Image (tube, helix red, strand yellow):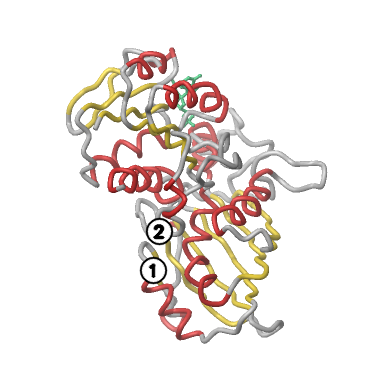
Amino acid sequence: MKVAVVGVTGMVGQVMLRVLEERNFPVKELIPAASQRSVGREIIFNKLAHKVVSVEEAIERVPGIALFSAGGSTSQKYAPLFAEKGTVVIDNSSAWRMNDDVPLTIPEVNPGSLKKHPNIIANPNCSTIQMLMALAPLHHSYKIKRIVVSTYQSVSGSGVKATRQLQNEREGRYEEMAYPHPIHNNCLPQCAEFDAEGYTTEEQKLLNETRKILDDYSIGVSATAVRVPVTGGHSESVNVEFYNDFDLAEVRSLLSKFPGVVVEDDPANNLYPMPVNAYGRDEVFVGRIRRDFSQANTLNMWIVADNIRKGAATNAVQIAELLLKQ
Ligand code: A2P
């Protein structure tokens, strides 16, 4: 399999390479691509140096799969050009996610979505992926009515510049700003831009992507997305109301059995998911599982995952694996 990684010099692109290596994805030829600025630079894959090429050259070499993480406008422009030539694009940006013909896939949750595609497949938003990894097995048993979610998102989700801002501010230097405010010692109730109603795009994604992935447009989602001074790993406080009542032991069992989910829930021993532990891991961690006594059929949970791994690179490579199997 000839595999292109478009955006290979970026934060997610680099982790895509590591995940391809770790999972022994059958890469016969790697085509690392980035912007014109990086053409000729060397990157390491499977202990060998590879020269970065332009996106145009990557298209001409007709890879079987192109993993994209180079921003929305790059995907918008180049994904159709790859697709025309027969390359299947797996795109990490939000450019194609809500396109009706494009599958929006979490392999453990909706593998059937890959049956038909226009050679473009969208990787969901990081916050949506980890939330639905924990909610999908429960939805199948109890049917979700409404979700209230607050996110605690790390700076790695905003890219290299934001990570540098946090690091600089930790060392007392307030210089280059990726955010409109300091992030060290702070929390920003803003992830991306606001719409006319006062919601951010990140919050809208949690609603729209949840409905598309679970193929249930009746589900309500009320989201507040918050950026916190954590280097890597997103956390989410989730309150979910079901149509049907649940048994807590059964909830734990459903979650434990779901592939890719790890239940870490032993409050007596201070055991619950935390970003410092989830960082660098591919699983989604769930804890603080408890009944909400203020309302019938309602559950509270705390969900943590590495947003660059399961939230981006790992999920994309898993989609590629599933395509190969099919
Ligand atoms: P480059 O390093 O050459 O700018 P991040 O989100 O971590 O900033 O990474 C973005 C990735 O997308 C980088 O690999 C970057 O390449 C790539 N990229 C940005 N703009 C373009 C573009 N116009 N064409 C191709 N790749 C791009």
Residue located at (35% from left, 19% from top): 58
Instruction: Classify mark 1: helix, strand or loop.
Output: loop
Local packing at callout 1 (Cα closer than 10 Å; few below 14, some 14-19, many 20+) is some
Where does residue 80 sit, x and y in percent of width and height?
49, 25
Q: Amino acid at mark 1?
A: Phe
Q: Is mark 2 within 8 Å of ligand 1?
A: no
Relative to residue 202, is residue 310 drawn left or right? left
How much space separates mark 1 and mark 2, taking CA atoms? 8 Å
Q: Indicate if the residue with disc 1 has its beta carbon within 8 Å of ligand 1.
A: no
Q: Which mark is residue 308?
A: none
Looking at the image, the residue that sits furthest to the front is: 116
Would you name the residue on which mark 1 appears? 258
Pinpoint residue 108: horizontal percent, then vertical percent: 40, 59
Of residues 145 and 264, the one nearer the viewer is 145
Image quarter hosting the N terminus: top left
Q: Nearer the viewer, residue 252 or 64?
A: 64
Give me the residue at 46% from left, 56% from top: 110
Which numbered circle lies on residue 108? 2
* 17 lies above or below 109: above
Q: Where does residue 294 sit, x and y in percent of width and height?
A: 71, 83
